[in-house]
Image: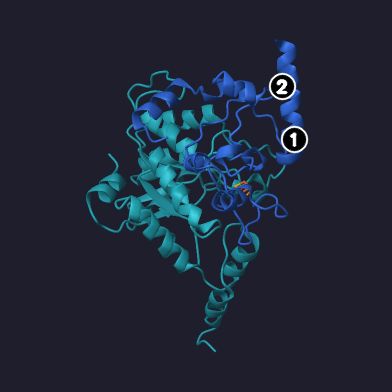
Chain colours: A cyan, B blue
Amino acid sequence: MSKLRDLLTQTKDVVYTAEFPVIDGGGMEQVKKNVDRLAPWFVAVNATDNTAAHAHASNVSVAIAMKQHGLEPIMQIVCRDKNRLAVQADMAGANLHGIENIALLTGDDVTAGDEPETRRVFDLDGPQAINVASILNAGTYLSGRKLNPAPNFFICSVENPFAPPHDYRIERALKKHRAGAQMIQLQIGYHPDRLEKFCAGVAATVPGLAIIPSVVLIKSAKPLSFMNDKVPGISVPQEVIDRVAQYNRFPPR
Amino acid sequence: MPKLLNLLLAVEHGMKKPVWDCTMCGQCVLHSTGMTCPMTCPKTLRNGPCGGVREDGHCEVKPEMRCVWVKAYDRKVSLPLPTVWKEHYNDLRPPVDMQLKGTSSWVNLITKRDQQTPAGWAKRKEQSGSH
Ligand code: SF4
């Protein structure tokens, strides 16, 4: 049973989700520590899939481990590293382990990671992967071959309303919804006007569609400059960087 | 017949390569994407831009290139393309059929081979009716 689905579809509650730290070291002990820290605050937490194009303990394995420790996962599947067979295998595997929340993402390019020499796959794109999840929900693989019992996925996706072409982001989110997405998490952004326009645009067509914007906690202005300079798709206005920089020292100047 | 097919293939490639950098995916969608080929996107995305488009509208992967989908959207809005083409802009395009790589999309259009999708995809399309 997905608590996330229940809260988002049957209540008007604001729902908080987070991202599970990647697992490279510390083993199950580390998983448990993270769960203990996050579980009191969040309904469900993203189990990432080679986030930022770096290899880590896999999406399915981390999602299972989280679930075993009592934290509801939102298992991400990214199109960058897996062809359509592997994407469906992740889905069928999640279903086998009773994981219901899955999020389908196109994914950062391999050039964002520490192994840029690798082959990029993108056999499916985000909207297609969402549609494939809907197909599995209906009891078959993409080929039409039966999958029994059929999954009951709560299908999530991600959009970036802050990146161009801004108007088109609304249409793209709606396309994802038509493909089967019932919740959209948003990427980090520092343009409230774009956020507002996006949410209003989506709500005008699909009033009930859940949208969860991202909040990032920072200790100084440095990560803002870093994101602005180095992360494609994120732009931070100079005035925001300056405003935060004032508080780098306390009391502020 | 094979001779004619080869001729068509050569003509199609000869026309589309210089203008659209055609990769002969064999299932052309140019008309519905503002006459911009999505296969020139480094991630070969057929359903719109990724989240990595830069603030200046350039590509996450190739900063020197304008994002294919920014171009497509601009053209869809500004070019006097037929309305039916524009209406297809937001279609959910199916995954690329890799078996068609290197074949003529013109022939595949006439034979409707380019509209064949896997059984699961086709069934969902029927049920949801929206794309
Ligand atoms: S920025 Fe545009 S062209 Fe570049 S990978 Fe993303 S969608 Fe493709």
Give residue A234's position: percent from left, percent from top. 57, 61
Contact (Cβ within 8 Å) of mark 2 with mark 1: no
Q: Earlier in the sequence, mark 2 or mark 1?
A: 2
Q: What distance separates the C-alpha of mark 2 from that of mark 1?
A: 14 Å
Residue B67: image location, x then y, percent: 64, 51
Residues A225 and A219: in front is A225
Look at label 2 and name its amino acid. Answer: Leu
The C terminus of chain A is located in which quarter? bottom right
Where disc 1 sits, the SS reads helix
> How many C-alpha atoms fall within 10 Å of the one at disc 1: few (<14), some, or many (≥20)?
few
SS at mark 2 in the image:
helix
The image position of residue A113, as x and y in percent, is 65, 49
Identify the residue under disc 2. Answer: B8
Seen in the picture, residue A113 relative to A249 is either above or below; the reply is above
| Above or below A217: residue B77 | above
Looking at the figure, which quarter contains the N terminus of chain A? top left
Q: Quadrant of residue A75?
A: top left
Of residues A221 and A80, the one nearer the viewer is A80
